[in-house]
Amino acid sequence: MKQTTGIDAALAARLLAGEASESEKERHRNRLAGDADYRSDWAQWLWVWDAAGTEEAERRDCDVAWTRLQRKTHSPLFLLKGRTLALSLAAAAVLLLALLLPLLWTPAANQPELLVTAGGDEIQELVLEDGTRVSLNTNSRLSYPEEFGPHERRVFLSGEAWFEVEAQGGRPFYVETDELLVKVVGTAFNVRSWPESAGVSVEVGSGRVEVHAGLDGAEHVLLQKGEGLVFHRGTQHLEHVPLNPNYLAWKTGQLYFEDTPLSEVLQTLERTYRRPITADHPSIFEEKLGGSFSHQSFEYVVEVLCATFQLEQSTVNGVVVLSRQ
Amino acid sequence: MGNADQELMQRLAQGDAGAFETVFRTHYTLLLRYACKITGDKAAAEDVVQLVFANIWEGRKRLEVKQLKPYLLRATHNKSLTFLMQHQRQASLELLPPLAEEEVDEVDEQREEVVRLLIDALPEQRRRIFKMSRLDGLKYREIATQLGLSVKTVEAQMGKALQFLRSSLPQALKNSEVSD
């Protein structure tokens, strides 16, 4: 029995339910970092909490999947094929249409299957059937048909990818994520839709794209070269943001900083390496960094930061924390 | 059962989105687990099940299905195999006979059932508080206001509920395995 080091049940519940005070959370983090017994006790609480919420998690999975499916089947943006033709015919010849309907539906039935590409440990370079080039980040997933339809090209993304789309008049290219629909005419842009982060972002390298949010695609924003936007999952709103100069570092392996405050450097490291990192004192965030890294590991970059600003690092609860020496 | 399915399919054929949602929500979790078992990959399974339902919607006017569940399981099975074939994760597909329906959700359903029983075994007020926090995601303050209690009481009840689950769950799970 680990009653002496164990976490009191009421405190565990507060921590898990997000009700703990800042000082409780702080103490919790410190003990997690320094006390192995405490860690294994915490793992037990976490396990019970997860088990008790499975049903709820499944309900939420189901909601997300239903939204995604509705996007596919109900949104006017997704009903282009065959449908417009059917409508214009309807006024003129109802009878003829009735005869034609089975024919109109047949192409839908023969629709190509989606190919699913799951990004592995390495960045994948794909060329789609229409000539569009895609760099798919690690741990990302792209679903696309073997052959695109005659009226549109559509892919589904989870994670992060860079697209260089071949322009094709009258055959727009769509990138779907759980929340957004990006419509492209011919351009190069980056989409980040990581399940664990608070926002989805789109960044445009050249040309322009139209980003739709909401089920019916009602809210939409036009993005030009050099612009970016974030869709906040919490508030469900789109916001213009300046382009992070290192937004393609995950693909190019190049990081470049010029008099950049550490607050921004750390954010860039987080998004590039997808490893949480922070500092424990405001003055650290204000330090300025200049210099570049080429194909360096997260660990290496952090070591350089520590050496440059005389910091030391510790890992608390999976988060790298920088502190003054 | 079969009749209810046929009625749903009729409404679906007429383009009734409500019927489609019912079909989706009733079977989604089961099909997802099934596809997961075959593909061994949750993300791929999600895509597979999306495809199954998208095809149902697109083909709703031509579908002649008397019983939905076996139909959906078979469609999920086929699409999962197609996925494996495209990714060559399975050299010979003959090695993969269709799973029996009962096999699909056995383990997960069992765990869920055990957890549900344990939560139901909590004293009434404690159970309500725990569900409002864990399942509905309400804040302690909101729970306290709704039930006319102090936040301190909610805190204490949450602690007791969690303590009970932690001390009973491992044994309860073990028992449920043995009893099968």
Image (tube, rainbow, N blue to C red):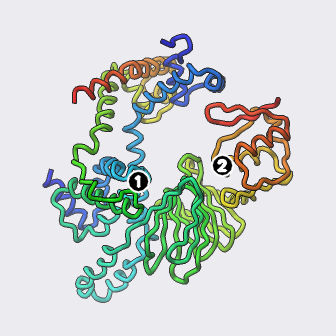
Q: Residue at x 15, y 59 (%)?
A: B66
Q: SS at mark 1?
A: helix
Q: Is residue B53 visible?
A: no
Closer to us: B71 or B117 = B71
Task: Locate the C terminus of chain A by quadrant.
Answer: top right
Q: Residues within 10 Å of mark 1 (few under 14, many from 20)?
A: many
Q: Residue reaching furthest left? A: B3
Q: Residue at x 79, y 56 (%)?
A: A256
Q: SS at mark 2?
A: helix
Q: Residue at x 23, y 86 (%)?
A: A95
Q: Position of residue A113 (x, y in %)?
A: 38, 68
Q: Earlier in the sequence, mark 1 or mark 2?
A: 1
Closer to us: A279 or A272 = A272
Q: Residue at x 47, y 33 (%)?
A: B138
Query: According to the image, label 1 marks what residue?
Result: A65
What amino acid is found at the position of numbered circle 1 in the picture? Ala
Q: Is residue A13 visible?
A: yes
Query: Could you say which disc has been placed on residue B50 in the image?
Result: none
Q: Residues within 10 Å of mark 2 (few under 14, many from 20)?
A: few
Identify the subunit bearing mark 2.
Answer: A
Mark 1 and mark 2 in contact? Answer it, CB < 8 Å. no
Query: According to the image, label 2 marks what residue?
Result: A273
Closer to us: B81 or B117 = B81
Is A264 situated above or below B6?
above
- Disc tally is 2
Q: Position of residue A152 (x, y in %)?
A: 47, 76
Q: Position of residue A166 (x, y in %)?
A: 58, 78
- The reply, left or right, for residue B15 in relation to residue A117 is left
Identify the subunit bearing mark 1.
Answer: A
Q: Nearer the viewer, mark 1 or mark 2?
A: 2
Closer to us: A199 or A154 = A154
